[in-house]
Every structure is written in C-alpha cells, then in structure tokens.
Image (spheres, rainbow, N blue to C red):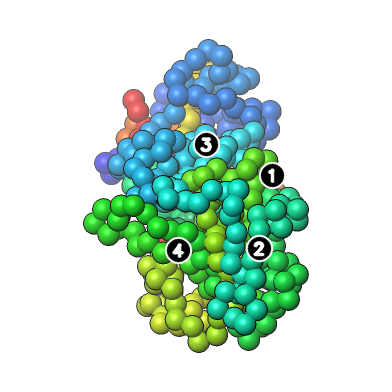
Amino acid sequence: MQGRRTFLQSGLGLGGSLLLGCDEEAPLRPRPRLTGQNCTEFSRATTASNDELVERGQLLGLEPFVGEDNVPLEQPLNSGLDGRLYTDLSRIGPGNLITPNETFYVRTRAPAELADAATWTIALAPSTEQPQQLTLSDLQQRTQDQGTHLLECSGNARGGGFGLLSSARWAGVPLLQVLEESGLVDASKLVLVSGFDTHAEPSANNHSTPGASWLFSFEQLADTGAFLATHMNDSELPLDHGRPVRLFVPGWYGCTCIKWVDSIDLVRDDAPATSQMQEFASRTHQQGVPALARDYLPANLQVAAMPTRVERWLVDGTVIHRMLGIVWGGREPYNAFEARLGNGDWLPVSMCGERQGTQTWSLWELIFSTEPGTYEVVLRASDPAVPQRRLDSQYYLRQFQVTS
Ligand SMILES: Nc1nc2c(c(=O)[nH]1)N[C@H]1C(S)=C(S)[C@@H](COP(=O)(O)O)O[C@H]1N2
Ligand SMILES: [Mo]
C-alpha cells in the first residue's frame, strides 16, 4: 500500500508538470495530447473499442468508482415520497452538458392523486384579504426561457453515486413578476410556496416527510431570480418533475424547488419554519433547526467539485488515465481547482474552458498514470478564501479503481 502511494505521488509530481511514463520501464515522455485540445469530445465508452481512438490514444474503457452502493442509475425506483431516479454522472461530457428529461434525477415521484393539469390553479395569497387565483394559462402566456440551471438535492450522497444532481434548460415566469402583476408585493411579509404532496403511502421508515413548502423573503426572490417553471428542455415538465408547475430557485438546493405548486401565500415575517424547512435544516447547513422561517440562511450551493468519470487509455503502448469531473455552485465562477489522489500532492486540474457563470456545471480534466489499486480523490478550490464548506469536509470524496 505504502509503495503504491509513493509511486503515485512521485509519478504525478514530476517537475510540477504531468509526465507520462513514471515507472522504470517506460522512458519519460512529455504528457501525450490525447486530443487536439483539452477535454475534446469523446463518445460514451463502457467497453473497449477500436472506434474510440482519438489521435494516438485508444480509449480502453472506464475505471469504476467503488464504495457507492451500486444503485441502479437512470431508471425510476419506488414511488411517491420514496421515488427516486439517479442520474449517471459519467455521461457528462463536453457535448453532453444538459441532462435529458428522462434521466434528470428525481427525488419524490408524482403523487398518484395529482389533479389534472388542465384544471390546475394556484391559490394566490389565500390567507390574506385579497385571495386570488392564478391559472395555468396565465402562466403559460408569460413563460420565457430562464436558461440552463443545475439542480442538486441537498441530500445528494456517495451511496447514490452523487446522482441526485442534474442540469437542464428551464422556461417559466419569475415569481416576483407574478406577485408584482397581482399587486402582492409587500416586503414586510414572507412568501410561502407550497406544493401538492399528498401521497397514498407514507415513506418507508418515515424517511421523507410529506408536505412540501418553503418560505422566502422578497429579497431572496429578487436575488435568486426564482421562477415558476412550466417547461424543461423545451418540453412540458414531466409529471415527476412537478407538472404542471414547479418552483425553481437558481443556486439553491432542490428542497426549496417545490414541485406541483398549488399555493403561493403571503405570511407574517414571524411565521414558523415549515416541516420541509425543518427536515432539510442540516442538509442546507443551517445552525440547528431554527423555529422561525426568517432565521433560515439562504439554502445556496457553495463551490463544489468532484470527479465523474475515469477513462483508461492506451497511448503508444502505455496505459494512462484521464479523469473528468465537474465544478459547480459558488457566488462567482471560480476557475482554479486542485485534486488529490490518494495521499499524493494537490495537483491543479485543467478547466475545459472558462466557466460560463455559476448556474450550471463546468468540466475539468486531469491526466495521470499510476499503478493498479484503489484511490481516493478529493478536490478543493485553490484559493482557500473561497467558501467551500462541502469540499472542506470532503463531502464529495470518491474512490476509484485502477484495474490491472
Ligand atoms: N411537492 C414536492 N416538491 C418537492 C419535493 C417533494 O417531496 N414534494 N422534494 C424536493 C426535493 S428534496 C428535491 S431535491 C427536488 C427534486 O426535484 P426533481 O425530482 O425534479 O429533481 O424537489 C423538491 N420539491
Ligand atoms: Mo432534495
């Protein structure tokens, strides 16, 4: 074990540049360009194939991530509150940055008792003296492209291959616009967004609590550009993603993005936190479980990064590896990240182009060569001043195997 680690460390650390051929037999050579450019297009490869040659390299296959429970990916599992679908993150690539609707992760599948979309209405300010109704056609007439945003479940975990994370292009109407047009802007109030969440069956072992609602200040709605989404990747929302309408809060965890929205209320700013807010308090990094909604911190995603795919290549008779991964979250599009394999040195990863904003993921790669074995990999933003709570705690640690 110790020998392998040392080998990796010295092999990767050579003169600060990544050199190939760090074992005794192979002479040192410059890092091979697998492709003309960093991170160039590749096809999905699960098996070795001669078709997958890129210049001098031949893609032999993917190395597995290990210790991740092997949940079935990209197929609906269970129903209702326990319903899940895990996205296969190894598919993400330069030409594959949008998750198709069919494989976008699901956390809670559509309740069986959901009302017909044709007659769907949203109660606006139902507890006030000006109760109103918003029809679906009111919304659809105003629907506009809202751009590409990723969504991550705050409970995204290694056991599910971190597959509760996906990115799509959304269309809908900013919630603030709806409230303005309805004469319902009152900054002294909080906005309570609730979704239909009556499920025939309770969650097994009470793993998930029914009742989906979250409270926002008007300032938070303005800051995030939260919108009521009606479309995803140019199609109507799929049922499991909230048809006919869901909330989407750019940059915040999925638990705030209420599906099957049927009520938007204005409440006093000393309103208690909802059961959903309490359930997700620790996963959204609150201090304890605050009793009042106004004491909740924004449930935003700080900078995060992880590997999503480890490719095994044959280049001029030598096996080398290319790790691909993603970075996401954060207030600004930080571009400098480092990875550590095993207990080796921190190595800068190559970003695949500049990050285009923070609303979706960006790709990086790291090319290395090492001995067979099992390796842990963690990442960090190079600048320690960048808030990166989940990276600091190695939340996204993954283990991969280099097969012999
Ligand atoms: N009505 C309702 N909305 C909900 C939930 C729920 O259980 N019921 N789950 C939330 C959680 S925890 C997440 S992560 C996202 C998942 O959205 P998706 O299934 O479209 O990916 O929906 C949120 N909205
Ligand atoms: Mo979630």
State the residue at coordinates (66%, 58%): 135
- Name the amino acid type tagged 4: Ala
Disc 3 or 2, which lies upstream in sequence? 3
Task: Tell me the SS state at disc 3.
Answer: helix
Instruction: Look at the picture and state if 364 lies above or below 257.
Output: above
Instruction: Name the residue that disc number 2 marks.
Output: 134
Instruction: Look at the picture and state if 236 lies above or below 42.
Output: below
Point out the frontmost of discs 1 and 3: 3
Disc 2 or 4, which lies upstream in sequence? 2
**What's the CA distance linking mark 4 and mark 1?**
38 Å
Point out the frontmost of discs 3 and 2: 2
Tell me: is circle 4 under 8 Å from ligand 1. yes
Outermost residue, top side: 50
State the residue at coordinates (47%, 59%): 196
**What's the CA distance linking mark 1 and mark 3?**
28 Å
Measuring from the top left, give residue 192's x and y in whole percent.
54, 72
Disc 1 or 3, which lies upstream in sequence? 3
Instruction: Quarter of the image for the C terminus: give it.
Output: top left
Disc 3 or 4, which lies upstream in sequence? 3
Measuring from the top left, give residue 267's x and y in whole percent.
55, 81
